[in-house]
Image (cartoon, rainbow, N blue to C red):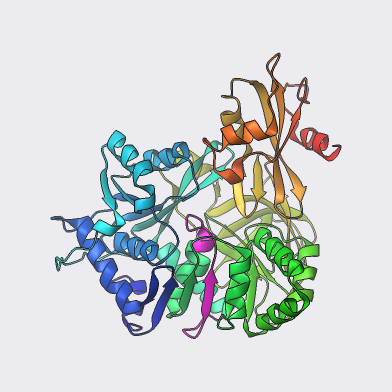
Amino acid sequence: MALPLISRAKENRERTAIRAAEGEFTYGDLLRISAQIAACLLGDGGDLQEQRVAFLVPSGFHYVAIQWGIWRAGGIAVPLCTSHPKPELNHVISDSGASIIIAHRHFEDLLRSLAQERGCRFLLTNEMLSDNATPLPDINLERRALIIYTSGTTGKPKGVVTTHQNIQAQVTSLVTAWEWTSADRILHVLPLHHIHGIINILTCALWVGAECHMLPKFAAEEVWNRILAGNLTLFMAVPTIYVKLIAAWEKASPQRQKDLSQACSSIRLMVSGSAALPLKVLNKWQDITGHFLLERYGMTEIGMALSNPLHGQRLAGYVGQPLPGVEVRLVDEQGNLVPEGSQGQIQVKGPGVFGEYWQKPEATAKVFFDGWFCTGDQAVMENGNYRILGRLSVDIIKTGGYKVSALEIEEILRTHPDIKDCAVVGVADEEWGQQICGALILQAGSSLTLKTLRSWAKERLAVYKVPRKILMVEDLPRNAMGKVTKPKVAELFSQT
């Protein structure tokens, strides 16, 4: 049985699927190339049987073809982040137990050594086109399809496992709610190791036979130029990107500002997600473009759960109501339902909810209660609409659309020879949502600076996890049990 995503693509063979740096490609091209990649992965075998295949490929056609090739061969796709340093890539490859590693030639030196160290089969993207007409296996929708790594309160990122069935449920819910059609054309500027980029944009577009225009990375002027071309119908981004687009618009000449604003009228929907959207940004974007950004709420573990309406009134500061096929409720600390107007933890149930953290049964069990996924996010429902209040854990920081573990960053910082102890917190910031800040206790005689710390940390952490501000302290604020009180740490930065 062919996956529904593949079957639907066969109905759109002649339509354009991807426009990217490599060129323009139809759904037929995508089917043909992904089948060749699947054949290469299979070799003499008939089915990868859920082998994990880690791949590091820039955003573009080859990323999509490889993802589809892995799925068509019966493997589990493990996307790697192009900006991650070697230790973070190694963690994902090691933790997922990947047996095959695929790399774009730009990342060959980085990943070939990791593959050799781990005894993995190593493939370059330009060496994967097989002429063999290998029969591809039938793929049941209940098979595992994807592992995306996300930070949690336990420090190191955990692998969120979703099946083909989970992905289909997540996609069809959004296609219904946001009325995707084959006439849509969306500009893709988000990372492709993150659910926002993989599911909400890429897979939704390909599910309906739409065009996905892919940029290798975000650049404000390039995005505005694409919008100015006037052929886009959808745009989705995180608040940080909207802040940067506003800044670029403000620097433009009056005539260009007018042209850019006018060009936005051809876009039917603009969405913001992955972090809270500041009211100031929402209002400014509406002033510039006429678009009242649609906010929604989701997580790697559940896909999207809540959304403001496509049609009808959208409320600033709210993330709307449950999406089609999704159940949402708020509960107190004892698991009891809370009345409307009272705050509680968001719990979610539905066919899009993941089934497990990869090989972490205890961590999986902790986040489920009577069949409901416990998100760890606090919210209140008012007049039927949900408003997010924040994380239950102060050790989860949401910055630039990414969910980051403060504990993971602290573990790395403590390995620096000049740092005796530290506490990492998120401090409210208009551009980033939260800015990562570190209070440091230094070794005697140290003269560590922010510049040298950031340079050191970028070799060990993804750049968005590196502290943007630091404070040197003699001691960290602690409670009677000696535990660091993170709210008081955050106050130290608000006083500077």
Residue 165 in view, yes or no: yes
Residue plotted at (23% across, 66% down): 36
Residue 210: x and y in percent read 46, 80
Q: Nearer the viewer, residue 71 or 303?
A: 71
Residue 26: x and y in percent read 36, 79
Image: 295 above or below 79: below
Q: Nearer the viewer, residue 266 or 303?
A: 266
The overriding secondary structure of the stretch rendered in magenta is loop
Residue 483 in view, yes or no: no
Check if residue 161 falls in the magenta segment: no
Residue lying farthest right?
A: 495
Residue plotted at (42% across, 65% down): 60
Instruction: Give the total of numbered labels.
Output: 0
Residue lying farthest top?
A: 444
Q: Is residue 183 left or right of residue 35?
A: right
- Quadrant in the picture for the N terminus: bottom left
Residue 151: x and y in percent read 55, 44
User: In the figure, residue 494 lies in which quadrant?
Assistant: top right
Residue 233: x and y in percent read 57, 81
User: In the figure, residue 324 lies in which quadrant?
Assistant: bottom right
- Quadrant in the picture for the C terminus: top right
Q: Nearer the viewer, residue 291 or 349?
A: 291
User: In the figure, residue 385 lies in which quadrant?
Assistant: bottom right
Image: 291 above or below 488: below
**Part of the protein shown in magenta:** 179-197
Residue plotted at (68% across, 27% down): 422
